[in-house]
Image: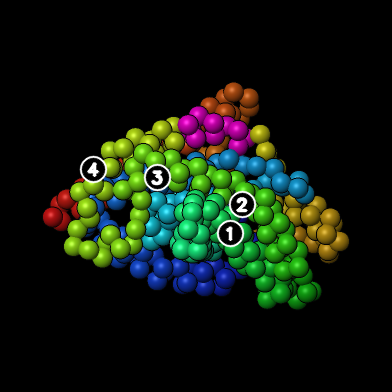
Amino acid sequence: MHIPENYLSPSTCATMFAVMAPVWYVSAKKVKVQIEKKKETVVQLGMGASLAFLIMMFNVPVPGGTTAHAVGSALLAILLGPWAACLSVTMALILQAFLFGDGGILCLGANTFNMAFVLPFVGYGIFLLCRKIFKKHGDKIGAFAGGYIGIVCAAFMCGVELGIQPLLFKNSHGNPLYCPYPLKISVPAMVGAHLIIGLIEGAITLMVYSYIKKVAPQTIYHASDYLNTEVSKTQNSGMKVWKKAIIAIIAVALIFTPLGLIASAPAWGEWDASGILTQLRKYHLNAVVPDAFKHGQGYHAAFDGYAIPGMNHGIEAAFGYILCGITAIIIFLLVAKILSAFVKSKE
């Protein structure tokens, strides 16, 4: 679901940044209130970004010879609140684009819209709805359904963003300038893959939510908490348990991240120029590489493809994959540390 560079027109990229700007602004304002009531929220942002980052490293093969992955946005929305989830997943996506080449830098507006806005807010809304409808186990039903429906909705939006490109942007010969796959191909392909991946997203959301509810239920986000003058002492006291639980989950995820290397095929809509030609022939479309891929933007990340230079095969590649995950976690925790220091200095 990470749209690469050159698949979207500059005007589409600019539009998606413009759409996300007020979302980031409101998220920052909302999370500021959370931080004022509960200082540990800053640490939760960093740990949430780490968890989402690791979840996205697990690529899973799907029918059609491509891969896809879960995101973890709905889980963070339930645990930390949708506004905090938005900021955490945005942090993860920014680092992925700049340091690991996963998703285009110009496409960050679109990628954050799909994975840091649509997914967590839809997922959280479904969670609340199910909790209200189902008297017994409504929260657990909502956790699974929120993760599943949230990622499918995000995939649908991604398919729309890709599919409108050949409709709106063509050269003088009528050939697409950017993504060459029309809506009738992009939407079913994206949604179809994530109808399967949604099961993993839902399962992860349910399992982690159920575990946190068992060991530190008072730490789970409730919007009403932040309408009061202060967060309850029991919620603050549960943060130590929360941190230990999330650290354990992050550690387990980190150890098993090399499993994401098993599925080596690219995700749908993330092919290079040669891959695009192959797919165009597969869909019986005009086999012409879009102009953007001939003369478009190019950016080579330091650890492109989550690979450490010189560590490209076998055990070395697996170890390099883990090192990339460790690097991301350190960066997120450093950012959280800096933010914490800033909050304290303002006090």
Residue type, label 2: Gly
Q: Residue at x 51, y 47 (%)?
A: 206
Name the side, left or right, on which 14 lies relative to 342: right
Q: Main secondary structure of the magenta part?
A: helix
Q: Which residues are drawn in magenta? A: 252-261
Does the stretch in magenta take in 288?
Answer: no
Q: Residue at x 71, y 74 (%)?
A: 167
Distance from disc 3 to disc 1, alpha carbons, whole Å, reads 21 Å
Q: Are marks 4 and 1 in contact (CB under 8 Å)?
A: no
- Residue 330 visible in rendering: no
Distance from disc 4 to disc 3, alpha carbons, whole Å, reads 15 Å
Question: Around disc 4, counting alpha carbons within 10 Å, would you say few (fewer than 14), some (14 to 19), or many (20 or more)?
Answer: few
State the residue in front, 135 or 281: 135
Does the stretch in magenta take in 253?
Answer: yes
Distance from disc 3 to disc 2, alpha carbons, whole Å, reads 22 Å
Q: Secondary structure at mark 3?
A: helix
Q: Which residue is mark 2?
A: 198
Q: Residue at x 43, y 40 (%)?
A: 211
User: Which residue appears farthest toward the top when viewing the image?
Assistant: 315
Q: Are marks 1 and 2 in contact (CB under 8 Å)?
A: yes
In front: label 4 or label 3: 3
Distance from disc 4 to disc 1, alpha carbons, whole Å, reads 33 Å
Q: Against 337, is 80 above or below?
A: below
Q: Which residue is mark 1?
A: 149
Name the side, left or right, on which 24 lies relative to 164: left
Disc 2 or 4, which lies upstream in sequence? 2
State the residue in front, 331 or 248: 248
